[in-house]
């Protein structure tokens, strides 16, 4: 009991933490193993062949979409995988900025985006106007922008980065003053590794990662004391301090190889990644690190595209992504500068 000026108060009760759930991505979208899903995937593949289309799926997509895709990976690897003369169309299953980046890097191809409403909260946390405002405040800083951003923001930036090369990109910049946008957690992680630079960090975040709290991850770790925690750098600092490995989605699947004697891995990123991890390592156990049934490290935008949307995009050639030529040229330059820097 606490006594305050206003009389006795009851001690607040500690929050009740729900037990961790072992499944992740299986809870989203169609069941990849169901016979009707398999039939639909075969039809989609046949259509794609007829229309000279390549289907790309981000690591965070539902399992059935990943199974339908020709390539699964991170946004940059996918945009580059599409750059083959035999493809006339790219069907991008991910969120909007990814399809836009694919169009920027493949301007002569038709880029189809199966669900118009699949945006990205992190990318939308920065706009042309807000970057202009920050640039006015920090006029002598070099702008490094994460690939999770709209094309017009990339075009106003000096260089782009992904989570797989952000540290190398910041190190490669000659200027000691950096304005890092839009993800504050990734920016802070990079700044800690490059102390020789003064890094000003924009205030955007990915809600699916930013919602995660250290106390919940610790509880999951207590339940699995021998587990290795792999976290994405879009997570907050307290999560990264607990992690054994911090890496991009592209690196997560391979990082398991470093731990041949570990059975259980806790994963702190969007749950879609579990599909590839479980496929690559069927003898291991992968558990979402959140320990909270409410959020499940689940991005609702990443789970919007269904197989029916994907089929319809191919049949009707919708929804086509267009980027104005001047914006595309600026964004391409920032992406090309990044690609000239080796990955971390
Ligand atoms: O670059 C990507 O695809 C994103 C958003 C994250 C990652 O780590 O792959």
Image: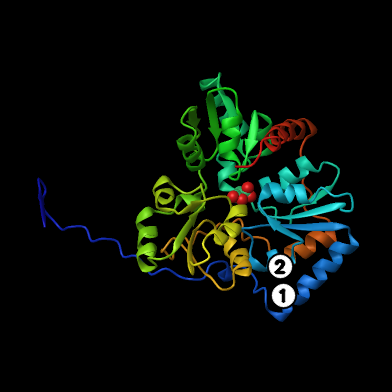
Report the side of 109 relative to 205 (left or right): right
Report the side of 9 relative to 56 (left or right): left
Position in image of residue 209 (x %, y %): 49, 52
User: Does residue 116 sit above or below 167 in this rendering?
Assistant: below
Q: Which residue has dot 1 on it?
A: 37
Judged from the image, the secondary structure of the residue bearing numbered disc 2 is: helix
Q: Which residue is nearer to you in this view: 56 or 162?
A: 162
Mark yes or no: residue 260 visible.
yes
Q: Which residue is nearer to you in this view: 159 or 116?
A: 159
Q: Which residue has dot 2 on it?
A: 67
Q: Residue at x 76, y 71 (%)?
A: 41
Q: Residue at x 78, y 65 (%)?
A: 311
Q: Residue at x 66, y 29 (%)?
A: 156
Q: Which residue is nearer to you in this view: 246 or 305?
A: 246
Q: How many marks?
A: 2
Position in image of residue 145 (x %, y %): 60, 35
Crowding at mark 2 (Cα within 10 Å: few <14, some 14-19, many 20+): some
User: Does residue 233 sit above or below 23 in this rendering?
Assistant: above
Position in image of residue 159 (x %, y %): 65, 31
Mark 2 vs mark 1, foreground winner is: 2
Q: Quadrant of the N terminus?
A: bottom left
Whole-number angstrom distance, CA of label 2 to CA of label 1 = 10 Å
User: Does residue 316 sit above or below 168 in this rendering?
Assistant: below
């Amino acid at each position: 009991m606490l006594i305050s000026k206003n009389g006795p108060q009851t001690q607040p009760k500690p929050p009740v933490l729900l037990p961790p759930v072992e499944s992740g991505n299986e809870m989203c979208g169609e069941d990849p193993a169901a016979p009707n899903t398999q039939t639909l995937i075969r039809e989609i593949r046949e259509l794609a062949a007829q229309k000279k289309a390549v289907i790309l799926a981000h690591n965070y997509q539902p399992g059935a979409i990943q199974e339908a895709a020709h390539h699964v990976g991170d946004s940059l690897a996918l945009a580059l995988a599409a750059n083959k003369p035999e493809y006339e169309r790219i069907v991008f299953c991910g969120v909007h900025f990814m399809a836009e980046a694919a169009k920027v890097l493949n301007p002569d191809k038709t880029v189809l985006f199966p669900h118009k409403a699949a945006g990205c909260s992190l990318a939308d946390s920065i706009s042309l106007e807000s970057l202009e405002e920050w640039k006015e405040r920090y006029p002598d800083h070099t702008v490094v922008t994460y690939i999770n951003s709209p094309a017009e923001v990339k075009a106003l930036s000096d260089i782009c980065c992904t989570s797989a090369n952000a540290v190398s990109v910041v190190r490669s910049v000659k200027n000691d003053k950096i304005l890092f946008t839009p993800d504050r957690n990734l920016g802070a992680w990079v700044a800690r590794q490059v102390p020789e630079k003064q890094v000003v960090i924009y205030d955007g975040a990915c809600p699916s990662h930013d919602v995660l709290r250290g106390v919940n991850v610790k509880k999951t770790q207590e339940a699995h004391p021998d587990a290795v925690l792999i976290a994405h750098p879009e997570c907050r600092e307290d999560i990264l301090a607990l992690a054994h490995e911090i890496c991009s989605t592209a690196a997560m699947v391979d990082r398991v190889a470093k731990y041949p004697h570990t059975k259980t891995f806790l994963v702190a990123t969007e749950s879609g990644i579990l599909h590839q991890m479980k496929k690559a390592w069927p003898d291991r156990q992968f558990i979402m690190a959140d320990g909270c049934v409410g959020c499940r490290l689940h991005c609702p935008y990443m789970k919007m595209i269904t197989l029916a949307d994907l089929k319809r995009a191919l049949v009707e050639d919708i929804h086509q992504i267009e980027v104005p030529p001047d914006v595309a040229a600026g964004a391409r330059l920032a992406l090309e500068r990044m690609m000239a820097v080796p990955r971390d």
